[in-house]
Amino acid sequence: MVGRRTLSDGEIRLFWQGIVEPAASRRTGLGLRLSLLTGARVGEIAGLCRAELDHVNDPARAMWTIPGTRTKNGRAQMIPLAPLARAVVLDLLNWSAPGDQFLLPTRSRRRRGPMRSNSLTQAMDNFGKRLDDDCEAARTWRAECPTPHDLRRTLETRLAGLRIPKEIRDRVLNHIPSDVGSKHYNVHDYGVEKREALERWSNAVGAILDPGSSVVPAHRAHEGSASAHLVGAQEDRA
């Protein structure tokens, strides 16, 4: 059965604040935030390392490039880091020692390297189990607990709502086009288009998290990119 679960605005607010608690779960929570913001799969998130990051100190050029050896379809994926995603990556870097290669290292004493993707899946499950039915978002979450893949589905659904064309959404999610022209003749990398799409989504998430802010709401975020002050605000809160 094809899944249809997506997060509501209330569930996004609940997830954003609660997924990084308690403090011992902060790194996995930040990884799951990054999944919501970029649409990357949890296996790709879990293996995030410094070598895959470029220009993280430059908001206009910050990029995460996942090599084909780590993607489901074997194709390298360039993910522009829009303001909120960049803030999450900076937070992960702050949690890492300068010599650490992986931003989400394993906690296992028997091996080294990145955490396994099921650690992120388990963290999402544990989050749902910790919730009390004290608000509507918590009740709907517990009634049908989302999985990490539902974060990816939420991003695509929200991008569609922001009028991002399917052609661009497919590139954001690293889906392989099926038509002959796209597969064999179109070699455009869609970097600019992906950055614009993810900046619109970052802007929309910012409005969901802080409805009283000056960030453009989701239903109006069809033009422009996220404002620069949002990065600083989120870095302070992260």
Image (cartoon, helix red, strand yellow):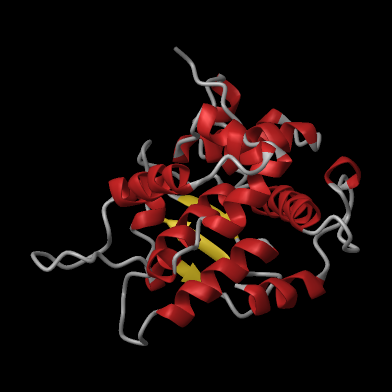
Question: Which of 69 and 155 lies nearest the eye of the viewer?
Answer: 155
Residue 62 falls in which quadrant of the image? Answer: bottom right
- Measured as percent of width and height from the top left, residue 209 is found at 74, 56
Give the residue at the far bottom of this rendering: 98
The residue at 63%/44% (across/down) is 134
Q: Is residue 2 visible?
A: yes
Residue 200 sits above or below residue 184 on the image: below
Residue 186 seen by the camera? no
**Relative height, residue 98 to residue 14 (above, below):** below
203 and 170: which is toward the camera: 203
Between 82 and 125, the residue placed more toward the observer is: 125
Quadrant occupied by the C terminus: bottom right
On the image, the x and y values in percent for residue 120 come to 37, 50
* Rendering quarter of residue 162: top right
Residue beneath the point at 68% across and 71% down: 234
Quadrant placement of the N terminus: top left
Q: Residue at (54%, 75%) from the top-left corner?
A: 90
The residue lying furthest to the left in this view is 110
Residue 101 spot, x, y in % from top left:
31, 75
Count the marks: how many? 0
In terms of depth relative to the viewer, which is nearer, 223 or 215? 215
Q: Is residue 191 above or below residue 222?
A: below
Q: Position of residue 121 (x, y in %)?
A: 36, 44
Q: Tell me if 74 is positioned left or right of 15 in this view.
A: left
Outermost residue toward the top in this view: 1
Q: Residue at x 65, y 46 (%)?
A: 12
Q: Can you tell which quarter of the image residue 72 is in?
A: top left
Q: Is residue 65 left or right of residue 121?
A: right
